Image (cartoon, rainbow, N blue to C red):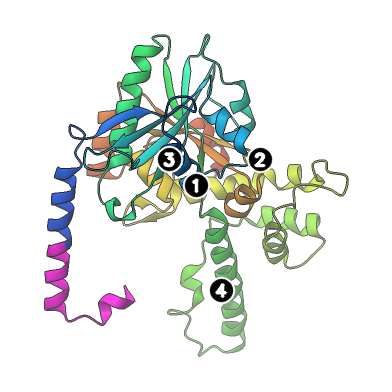
Amino acid sequence: QRGQDLIPSTDLTKLQTLERNIQTILTSLFRPGVLDLQRITYQESAASIIEQIAFQEAVHPLQSLQDLKTRLGPGRRCFAFFHPALPNKPLVFVHVALLQEIPTSMSDLQYATESNATCATFYSITNTEPGLAGVDLGNHLIKSVVSVLQKEFPKLTSFSTLSPIPKFRNWLEGKIVRYHEGLREKQQSKLDSRHDVSNSSLRFMDDDLFHPTELQQLERIFSSHTPLLDLLETLKSPNWHIDDEGNDSDLVGKLQPILMKLAAYYLVVERHYGRPLCPVAKFHIRNGAEMYRLNYMADTTSKGMRNSCGMMINYHYLLDEIETNRTQYEINYNVMVKEGVKCCLNSVGPDHDN
């Protein structure tokens, strides 16, 4: 946005037109009919391709060679799109776990099985080419993989994700900082009746976000008169959920209601031009999924704790309702939100049954 402000409007219009034309060309060149869907296996795929899958994984970085073998082994699937002009370059790839029910945490993936599997869970999607960001490869990949899996496993009845909430903690930090700026503005306005608060931080304060009862609970938890700042400082550590003996900290249970509510607020209520603020939510909702369930302490890796305080969400793809959901979202910005997410909102904001 700052860069655009420095470009004359006529030149900016030309650049935007050029960008749209390039995107149209790329979309045509990389359309589903041209792309080749391949399953990646440790035994049969080329070593150079496996290496790219390993090093370019963007969602859940690999921990070891055994971790890689597990992701490509029994009960799991990895699929990638290739272009005929780039036969050794995976453009986008997805990891899938075959399970008996929709998982609530990353640890549930260890129970992946090909026998009696009824649920296929997409737990990582990575685009390897930033220049193709405007081409909807991820959507096409999911549809293609669903079709392949249905043929291989006729008993599959559920297709879901176990997805991160990658920018949640940063969003929460911004909300808490602006909340305290607003408090200072309020205090100043009481001291100075001439103080104009119309353009101040007060406009950034969300009256629905931090309820007085929740603030009181946090005051008791942290024994502090600035509990939100203490909460923020606590969440900066990726190990806040573990005590000195390696067990779950008392804070895990005490902070669960407020963190789940804040995450649900971020996913459901917080919008930008009618669209979800969370980029992962935007991707899956645009593809016709519904918000199914919010999961607490689902990813306790350092990355998971830093980005989303350990929380993850399931997006559910109901095959008979995908097109209806997509249409409702594109026309009316309606998002299907199930009880597993709505229940976390409590009384925040309006009813979100859309």
Q: Disc number at residue 43? A: none
Q: Is residue 237 left or right of residue 268?
A: right
User: N-terminal of the two: label 4 or label 1?
Assistant: 1
User: N-terminal of the two: label 2 or label 4?
Assistant: 4
| Residue denoted by label 3 | 48
Hey, what amino acid is under mark 2? Answer: Met
Q: Which residues are magenta?
A: 1-18
Which secondary structure is most common in the magenta stretch? helix
User: N-terminal of the two: label 3 or label 2?
Assistant: 3
| Residue denoted by label 1 | 55
Q: Position of residue 140 (x, y in %)?
A: 28, 34
The quadrant of the image that shows the C terminus is top left
Report if residue 16 lies within the magenta region: yes
Residue in the picture at 15% in, 78% down: 9
Residue in the picture at 73% in, 63% down: 230
Hey, what amino acid is under mark 3? Answer: Ser
Q: Disc number at residue 182? A: 4
For marks 2 and 4, give the one nearer the viewer.
2
| Residue denoted by label 2 | 297
For the residues labelled 1 and 2, the Cα–Cα distance comes to 26 Å
The residue lying toward the viewer, choosing from 318 and 303, is 303
Hey, what amino acid is under mark 1? Answer: Phe
For marks 3 and 2, give the one nearer the viewer.
3
Q: Is residue 170 visible?
A: yes
Report if residue 39 lies within the magenta region: no
